[in-house]
Image: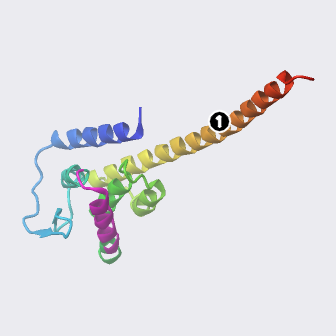
Amino acid sequence: MPGYIRFGLLMTLMLAACTNRPALPMASPVVHEPSGIIRPVVQSSGRAVLAFYRHARTLSKPALAREISYMTDLLQKEPTDSLRVELAMLDLMPSRADVDQAQIVLRPMIGRDTGTELGSLAYLLNDYAGSMKDSMRRLHDEQKRNKVLAGKLNALKNLEIHLMEPGH
């Protein structure tokens, strides 16, 4: 199954898991960011983070790059768990797939048992990033192996052509 389908399925399952719980109160004050994404001022719930992802996946690549840049700067000033999870989600989007950066962003949350929705999402995203990294490594190894095999096949073809020439 292609990575973008697995990631979309993963996010859908996470959203479904959050919707089976009673509604959590949302923060009333909101900040309108330059990218047009509405971000609660206080710590977000897992549901709010997933709603953010649902909107962010509709962004164009330039808008996504601006949002990631803005969020990276904001994370330096105000490091919150919700911002870490949101940024990791963006880093793991199929159009970006910066697995290493996602794991770096999540690292402060991993190993710290928060017992919250955001903590669970962080562990899930970190595990997903690890499996993506393994898949990319295997793909790279297979591509390298295929390149070597293609070179050997070309050498055999050249040898066959050479042997079919008159006088051999």
- At a point 92% along the width and 23% down the height, the residue shown is 167
Which residue position holds label 1? Answer: 146
Q: Residue at x 85, y 24 (%)?
A: 165
What SS does tag 1 mark?
helix
In the rendered image, the residue lying farthest to the bottom is 77
Where is 162 relative to 21, above or below? Answer: above
| Other-residue count near label 1 (Cα within 10 Å), few / some / many at <14 / 14–19 / ≥20 | few
- Side of 32 relative to 77 (left or right): left
The quarter in which the N terminus is drawn is: top left
Q: Quadrant of residue 2?
A: top left
**Vertical side of 141 occupied by 88: above or below:** below
Region in magenta: 58-73
The amino acid marked with disc number 1 is: Asn
Q: Residue at x 36, y 41 (%)?
A: 4
Give how far across and how far down residue 151 sits, in percent. Answer: 72, 37
Decide whether residue 71 is among the magenta residues: yes
Residue 127 visible to the viewer: yes
Q: How is the image coloured?
A: rainbow
Q: 20 and 100: which one is in front?
A: 100
Give the x, y percent position of residue 68.
32, 64
Residue 103 lies in the magenta-colored region: no
Q: Which quarter of the picture shows residue 138?
A: top right
Which SS type dominates the magenta stretch?
helix
Q: Is residue 80 visible?
A: no
